Amino acid sequence: MSFLKITDPAKRDFLVKKFIESKNNIQRDLMSEKIGDIGLQRELTKAYKPILESQSKMSTDLRGELSAIKESSISSANALKALPTSLKAIQFPQYPSIEAYDDLVPDIKTLELGDLATEYLQHYASNKKLADTTFGIHSKDGVFYIGVSPISIQGDDVTVGDKIYEGTPGLWELLTLINPDESIYDNNDLEEYAEILVTTKAMEQSNNPSKPKSNRGYKYNTIIKPIWEKNKTKIGKGIILPQDPDALVDMLHLRVNSLKAGNTGVRNEIVSICDELLRQGAIDKEYYKTINNVIIKHASS
């Protein structure tokens, strides 16, 4: 509607007045509504502020916990990646977990073992004076060894090479303690232990396999020395050879290298070693002849 088209001044003034009044009423209503909204917001804020603050704190705490869990998970994943593969073979969830000692297993804090293995390894690790790390179990870089051979432990049983040895109390006495209790181990345990010692070369000196790691201890004199002597064969004058073919081969290599270096005094030992290897079927006649040709060549030079 246009007020300019109203020719009656009185009617025009009346309509203009009504229009202004309506406009003012609308403005007042809008203002009241806005003021009411502000008041309502204040009342709601006042009523729910503690809840909002609590939720904000919970959200902050939750983010902190999630961040800590994430960091812990990353650290755990990195630690698991660093584990030696051979040690994973001794983790079995069906057995109770024990605390291991740093000097026994440097890279692992917990091992999953059988009750008997747990008992002996805990006792073994807690008292170094009782532990036999020369002719028994020792560790390096988080891996268990006997002699030069890595081993694995499954429950209470011990695996050396391809053979699994039943983990009896007697065998564990012999494998871990410097003074094993005679009332605990029997002849079968001794035979198993002797086989392990020969297989792992735990009795031999690293630089001279024909000589034992001798000492004056009780275990050496009563257990190790008889096993050593039983597994040796005397050939010729004063030459003592092991029956283990691997040890014989090691000796042969050492003696041949010594001969090549000019030490002709090892000739008889080389011949004796070759004779024993040939007798055991570890070498054939062609290889025997090859070694003899080496002996002739260097002994006459």
Image (cartoon, rainbow, N blue to C red):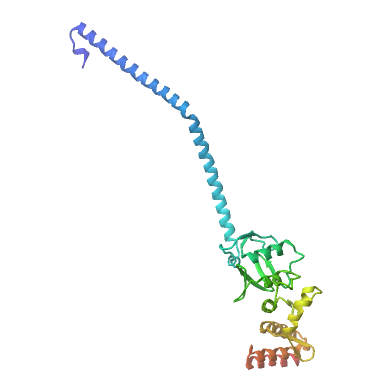
In the image as oriented, which residue stretches furthest toward the front? 183
**Position of 214 relative to 144 (above/below):** below
| 7 is higher (above) or lower (below) than 114 | above
- Residue 212 visible in the shown view: no
Q: Residue at x 65, y 68 (%)?
A: 144
x, y (%) of residue 205? 75, 77
Compare residues 38 and 22 and report the one nearer the observer: 38
Tell me where residue 279 sits by quadrant. Answer: bottom right
Where is residue 245? Give x, y as percent: 67, 84
Q: Nearer the viewer, residue 16 or 51?
A: 51
Q: Quadrant of the N terminus?
A: top left
Q: What residue lies at 77% left-to-right and 74% top-to-bottom?
A: 219
Residue 234: percent from left, percent from top? 75, 89
Which residue is located at x 52 percent, y 43 percent? 63
Q: State the image coordinates of residue 20 (x, y, percent, origin top left).
A: 28, 13
Left or right of 285, for residue 178: right
Residue 153, visible in the rendered structure: yes
User: Residue drawn 74% across and 67% down?
Assistant: 131
Q: Nearer the viewer, residue 214 or 226?
A: 226
Is 181 above or below relative to 96?
Answer: below
Image-based side of 218 in relation to 5, left or right: right
Q: How many marks?
A: 0
Quarter of image, res 133? bottom right
* Quadrant, the C terminus: bottom right
In the image as oriented, which residue stretches furthest toward the top?
A: 10
